[in-house]
Image: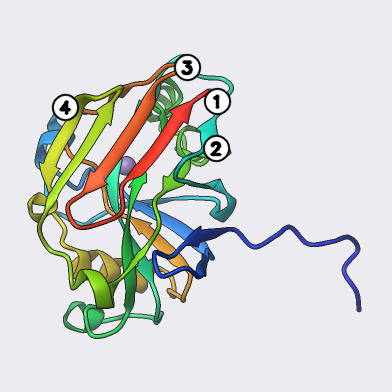
Amino acid sequence: MSYAFEPAPIPSVRVTSGSLFPVRRIYCVGRNYAEHAREMGSDPVREQPFFFSKPADAVVASGAVLPYPARTANLHHEVELVVAIGRGGRDIPASEVDGGHVFGYAVGVDLTRRDLQAAAKAKGQPWDMAKGFDRSAPVSAIMPVSQSGTMSKGKIELRVNGELRQTGDIADMIWRIPEIVHELSTLVKLAPGDLIFTGTPAGVGPVVSGDRLEASVEGLDPLVVTIG
Ligand code: MN
């Protein structure tokens, strides 16, 4: 049986070594740094991490110019460490995550239509349209774990037009990467090609047309995008 029409191309992210990482799914962790939870009006708690997702084709490469998205007047930046899954599984024990499940790491920005998110929160509605819109997931080139080593600390920063807006350390995550991968794998079966945005440190704020965003995590390729 043939397809009724040509399938959409497989979304991908560049790997620093030169190949392409085919993206299957994008998951994101909410409120994973205490200071950010507080700035969003929540108490930082270690009950259970919660997840939301973005469509795989929301990925955008570093260097892109992103049109200012529709239906928002409050587009926010959230710099995040992104974990690329190379070996999947179900109920992956946290102790085994660094034993081969991580393909590599990248820097991402979880672009958020904050006004739509606030409206959704107020009505108890889902966040999909606040978080999972077109081009909402800029990601830098993925550095293979063989090059970066297992990442558990390092400065994470975001600058807008050269001005420092967000700064933190990935060591300050409430949920560490092995715990995040474990928890997520008890909810869904993970597979090679999955990307996990691991949450943002404090300092989120709005961007406007013409802004240049530079996101970095110590040791990884930086991410630069411009809002058109
Ligand atoms: Mn986020």
Looking at the rendered structure, the kind of residue marked 4 is Glu
User: Which mark is drawn over residue 69?
Assistant: 1
Select label 3 or label 4 by which is in front. 3
Looking at the rendered structure, the kind of residue marked 3 is Ser
Mark toward the start of the polypeptide (3 vs 2): 2
Confirm if mark 4 falls within 8 A of ligand 1: no
**Where in the image, quadrant-wise, is ligand 1 located?**
top left
Labelled pair 3, 4 in contact (Cβ < 8 Å)? no
Q: Badge 1, how many Cα within 10 Å: few under 14, some, many 20+?
A: some
Pick the residue in front: 224 or 192: 224
Q: Residue at x 19, y 73 (%)?
A: 149
Looking at the rendered structure, the kind of residue marked 2 is Phe
Where is mark 4, residue-wise?
39
The alpha-carbon separation of the residues under discs 1 and 2 comes to: 8 Å
Pick the residue in front: 1 or 186: 1
Where is mark 2, residue-wise?
133
- On screen, residue 196 versus residue 228, left or right, reads left
Q: Badge 3, how many Cα within 10 Å: few under 14, some, many 20+?
A: few
Select label 3 or label 2 by which is in front. 3
Select label 1 or label 3 by which is in front. 3
SS state under label 3: loop
User: Which mark is drawn over residue 225?
Assistant: none
User: Which mark is drawn over residue 209?
Assistant: 3
SS state under label 2: loop
Q: Residue at x 25, y 45 (%)?
A: 216
Q: Residue at x 41, y 70 (%)?
A: 17
